[in-house]
Image (cartoon, rainbow, N blue to C red):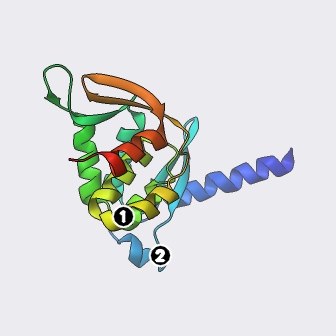
C-alpha cells in the first residue's frame, strides 16, 4: 500500500514539474534529443501532450474529443467541416517528427489524421509511417460527405493513403 502511494506521489510531482516547462524556449533547445510525448494526469484519465507546442496540444485534444473523423465537406449541404479544418492546421503546423509521435497517440482519430498529414507532407515514406501506426485495429467512425461508416483504423488509413486517387 505504501509503495503504491509513494509511486503515485512521484508521478503527480513529475507531472506538476512538467507543467512548469517554459513554452517560450523551443523543444529542441530544452531537450537535445527529440521531443517526446509526455503523459499528464489531469482529471480522471491521462492525456498525451507534447512538450513545447501548446498549439498542437490544443489541436490534438480537439481531434481526440470528436466522435468521428470527417472529410473536408460534410452533410447534404456540403458544409465545410471544422474537424477537417483542425486536421489541416495540425498538418501544416506539425513537423514530421511531431506527426510521427502522434502515430502513438491514444486516440485513433489523432493517429488517423497524423498519418494522413505525414502522407501528404512526405509521400515517399508513407509506407514507413503506416508501419509505425499504433492501434491499427482500433475502431474508427468516419463521416465522408453525408455518408457515415465505422470500421478499423487500418482500413480507412489504407484506403485513404494507398488506394484513393485524388
Q: Nearer the viewer, residue 100 or 52?
A: 100
Q: Secondary structure at mark 2?
A: loop
Residue at 14 percent of width and 26 percent of height: 78
Query: Residue reaching furthest right?
Result: 1
Residue 12's spot in the image, x, y percent?
Answer: 63, 51
The reply to whether residue 84 is in sight is yes
Residue 13 relative to residue 36: left or right: right
How far apart, in angstroms, are the residues tagged by discs 1 and 2?
A: 13 Å
Spot the residue most to the top. 76
Q: Is residue 50 visible?
A: no
Residue 66 point in image, percent of width and height: 38, 32
Q: Which mark is residue 23?
A: 1
Which quarter of the figure has residue 1?
top right
| Residue found 49% across the figure and 77% down from its top | 33
- Sort mark 1 into few (<14), some (14-19) or many (20+) by Cα contacts within 10 Å: few
Left or right of 16 in this view: 125: left
Q: Nearer the viewer, residue 4 or 127?
A: 127
Q: Is residue 146 above or below residue 59?
A: above
- Taking the spot 13% from the left edge, 21% from the top edge, the residue there is 77
| Residue matched to label 2 | 31
Which residue occupies 20% across, 47% down?
A: 166
Q: Which SS class for mark 1?
A: loop
Q: Left or right of 78: which side holds 88?
A: right
- Give me the disc on residue 68: none
Residue 80: image location, x then y, percent: 16, 33
Badge nearest the viewer, 1 or 2: 2
Amino acid at each position: 500500500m505504501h509503495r503504491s502511494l509513494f509511486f503515485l506521489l512521484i508521478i503527480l510531482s513529475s507531472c506538476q514539474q512538467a507543467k512548469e516547462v517554459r513554452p517560450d524556449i523551443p523543444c529542441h533547445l530544452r531537450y537535445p534529443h527529440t521531443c517526446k510525448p509526455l503523459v499528464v494526469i489531469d482529471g480522471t484519465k491521462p492525456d498525451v501532450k507534447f512538450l513545447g507546442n501548446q498549439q498542437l496540444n490544443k489541436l490534438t485534444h480537439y481531434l481526440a474529443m470528436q466522435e468521428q473523423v470527417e472529410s473536408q465537406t460534410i452533410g447534404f449541404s456540403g458544409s465545410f467541416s471544422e474537424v477537417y479544418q483542425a486536421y489541416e492546421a495540425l498538418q501544416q503546423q506539425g513537423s514530421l517528427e511531431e506527426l510521427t509521435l502522434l502515430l502513438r497517440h491514444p486516440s485513433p482519430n489523432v493517429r488517423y489524421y497524423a498519418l494522413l498529414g505525414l502522407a501528404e507532407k512526405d509521400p515517399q515514406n508513407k509506407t514507413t509511417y503506416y508501419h509505425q501506426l499504433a492501434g491499427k485495429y482500433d475502431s474508427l467512425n468516419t463521416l465522408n460527405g453525408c455518408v457515415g461508416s465505422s470500421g478499423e483504423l487500418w482500413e480507412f488509413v489504407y484506403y485513404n493513403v494507398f488506394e484513393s486517387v485524388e
